[in-house]
Amino acid sequence: AIQLTQSPSSLSASVGDRVTITCRASQGIGTDLGWYQQKPGQAPKLLIYAASSLQSGVPSRFSGSGSGTAFSLTISSLQPEDFATYYCLQDYNYPWTFGQGTRVELK
Amino acid sequence: EVQVLESGGGVVQPGGSLRLSCAASGFTFASFDMSWVRQAPGNGLEWVSSINTSGGGTHYADSVKGRFTISRDNSKSTLYLQMSSLRGDDTATYFCALDRAGSSWHLFRGQGALVTVSS
């Protein structure tokens, strides 16, 4: 199975900060990767699909990049509602796998 | 508006069975692949199973293969997950998702169904 390794596992940031989360795949997956935001007690929310495509309705401060084995999610200016846990997901092949998550906390 | 409602969760003893349902509305259910993803308490997300539009193609995580069965009824716009031989590590909230094949696009719209396996 393809392993996805996210870094960092957690980070502390302030409103207005630029935040970047990385996701590294154990083998090449093209651009078959998505990014999700999850808040406690809620379902995951799709932010980015196909590595860099912004899901409809998601603010433009979120962006994704990468291909092959290295991917990143960037929040250009962190807002109060962005404090959450973020996951990457690959569906290049089965079994689909998630990264372990990155918790973004208020500094 | 795309909506899904997961149901059927509850407390079950180890070795028991349970069937989850995911009732869909607001979109053409028969046009989308569907999946189940779960999250154990305090843990991350884990893909469980996926099914194609016709129901003729299914995939399972190794952790549930042979114990869980995914199915769908397009006439009822409903996805199912039949779970048997349940174990403690199956305790989780189970979410269903819409999938757009080949685009890494997976949409979650429900609140999930909590399954607790305990004696």
Image (cartoon, rainbow, N blue to C red):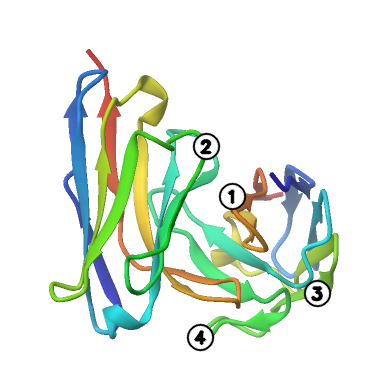
Please tell me which residue is depicted at 85% across the width and 66% down the height of the picture.
Answer: A68
Please tell me which residue is depicted at 36% across the width and 74% down the height of the picture.
Answer: B53
Q: Secondary structure at mark 3?
A: strand
Give coordinates of residue B80: x percent, y percent. Answer: 24, 55
Asked whether the viewer can see residue A3, the reply is yes
Cα gap from disc 3 to disc 2, whole angstroms:
30 Å
**Given contact means CB atoms under 8 Å apart, are the residues at marks 1 and 2 in contact?**
yes
- Same-chain status of marks 1 and 2: no
Cα gap from disc 4 to disc 2, whole angstroms:
35 Å
**Given contact means CB atoms under 8 Å apart, are the residues at marks 3 and 2 in contact?**
no
Asked whether the viewer can see residue A19, the reply is no
Q: Amino acid at mark 3?
A: Ser
- Residue bearing mark 2: B62
Q: Amino acid at mark 2?
A: Asp
Query: Is B59 left, or right, of B20 in this rendering?
Result: right
Q: Amino acid at mark 4?
A: Gly
- Same-chain status of marks 4 and 1: yes
| A92 vs B118, nearest the viewer | A92
Q: Nearer the viewer, mark 4 or mark 2?
A: 2
Q: Secondary structure at mark 2?
A: loop
Cα gap from disc 1 to disc 2, whole angstroms:
8 Å
Q: Amino acid at mark 1?
A: Pro
- Same-chain status of marks 4 and 2: no
| B84 vs B47, nearest the viewer | B84
Write down the chain letter for disc 1: A
Give coordinates of residue B100: x percent, y percent. Answer: 49, 77
- Residue bearing mark 3: A65
User: N-terminal of the two: label 4 or label 1?
Assistant: 4
- Residue bearing mark 4: A57
- Residue bearing mark 1: A95
Q: Secondary structure at mark 4?
A: loop
